[in-house]
Image (tube, coloured by chain):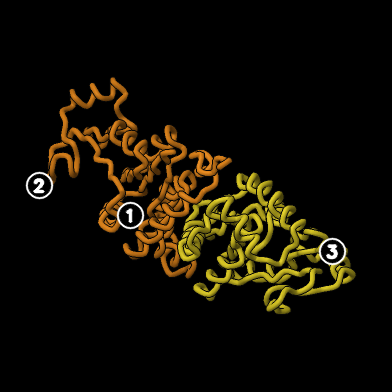
Chain colours: A orange, B yellow
């Protein structure tokens, strides 16, 4: 029986280092597939079609929305960004694990459609620093602490919607944790039973 | 804030190789604590008091039951087996991870008290292999062999009550998977949030 691949969603606040982590993860694990997003923004220098993004026109993008061809999409600063559904679904069906590197808004949309995905929240190392400052108490003025709390907790409150949180203090360590999460998820009883892994041998 | 340790329950049908896996796991991970069970059965050759089991009389065991000193206990083939509560609770409170190697009946009792434990079901590579392993152990009469076979097949059904299943085809591989499960569990958002990992103070 062909076992379905895992959809691994790497997400978190901007500046957390999602991109760096995904790059290192993919370099170490050649069998992982990465989903390439579509966007209507212009390519930046060095960006390549089909590697960084699929660059499409606004008309084309809206036509794809119409045809329900996105797993998730969003508008950021007037440009569309979206994850084409077809590639992801095909790879999962083949039994390949697929990485999605997306923002929080997109991840929550994917979770509605794919609750069986693995949702990993990347925390910036500054969050660790913040935690240390909170513990040390009184090393900052109350005003500056409050400003930081507000920003940090706005983002953190979405963390509870995720399955895992990985602090990006050292990229290698963060990648190892994600690799472990993938191994562990494949050992989950509900996944193994769903895949018919132990159907009676007679 | 002191983070509570993980209670890791390694369980599964008799003959699956729980003991071998635990031994290898502990040898590689010196910071893991193992809970030693009490039993009223006689020591097998090579078994040592306080290492393999605490060997106690039936009277002593029943007295401990009376005093609610077990996290779980059960009768298997006419003998009592039980996990003394005190050691486990003290180590978890200190932030140490504790391994329990117990049978399915016991694991289900622990799950009722500690649903936040990590429940890992060890599977033999195949049911054929399970039979061979029980036979090879050689410490059984034919009647007791048949009883054990029937029980083992019955027990596979309980897998769905566990969080993870690890097939014991190669011990090293099985141990690596369990190590990953421990790493992954520590990244779980609900554990990090419950531990107050990101709580706002003051």
Q: Which residue has dot 1 on it?
A: A16
What is the secondary structure assignment of the residue under circle 1?
loop
Residue A48: image quadrant is: top left
Q: Nearer the viewer, mark 3 or mark 2?
A: 3
| Tag 3 subunit | B
Residue lying at 88% horizontally and 63% vertically, measured from the top left = B66
Whether label 3 touches label 2, CB < 8 Å = no
Quadrant containing the C terminus of chain A in the rendered view: top right
For label 2, the crowd category at 10 Å Cα-Cα, with few meaning under 14, some 14 to 19 and many 20 or more, is few
Residue lying at 42% horizontally and 58% vertically, measured from the top left = A180
Residue lying at 59% horizontally and 62% vertically, measured from the top left = B17
The answer to whether A47 appears left or right of A118 in the picture is left
Q: Nearer the viewer, residue A106 or B56?
A: B56
Q: Which residue has dot 2 on it?
A: A45
For label 3, the crowd category at 10 Å Cα-Cα, with few meaning under 14, some 14 to 19 and many 20 or more, is some
Q: Are marks 3 and 1 on the same chain?
A: no
Q: Nearer the viewer, mark 3 or mark 1?
A: 3
Residue B1: image quadrant is: bottom right
Q: Can you say whether A67 is above or below B107 in the image? A: above
The answer to whether B44 appears left or right of A159 in the picture is right
Q: Which residue has dot 3 on it?
A: B65
């Amino acid at each position: 029986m062909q076992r379905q691949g895992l959809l691994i969603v790497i997400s978190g606040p901007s500046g957390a280092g999602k991109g760096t982590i995904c790059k290192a993860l993919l370099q170490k694990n050649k069998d992982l597939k990465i989903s390439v997003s579509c966007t209507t923004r212009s390519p930046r220098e060095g960006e390549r079609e089909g590697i960084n993004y699929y660059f499409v026109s606004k008309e084309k993008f809206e036509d794809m929305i119409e045809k329900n061809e996105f797993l998730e999409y969003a508008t950021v600063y007037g440009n569309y960004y979206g994850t084409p559904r077809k590639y992801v679904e095909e790879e999962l069906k083949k039994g390949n694990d697929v990485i999605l590197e997306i923002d929080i808004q997109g991840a929550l949309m994917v979770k509605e459609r794919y609750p069986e995905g693995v949702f990993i929240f990347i925390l910036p190392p500054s969050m660790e620093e913040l935690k240390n400052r909170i513990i040390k108490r009184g090393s900052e003025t109350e005003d500056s602490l409050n400003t930081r709390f507000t920003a940090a907790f706005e983002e953190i409150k979405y963390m509870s919607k995720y399955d895992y949180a990985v602090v990006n203090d050292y990229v290698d360590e963060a990648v190892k944790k994600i690799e472990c999460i993938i191994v562990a998820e494949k050992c989950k009883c509900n996944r193994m039973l769903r895949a018919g892994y132990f159907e009676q041998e007679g």
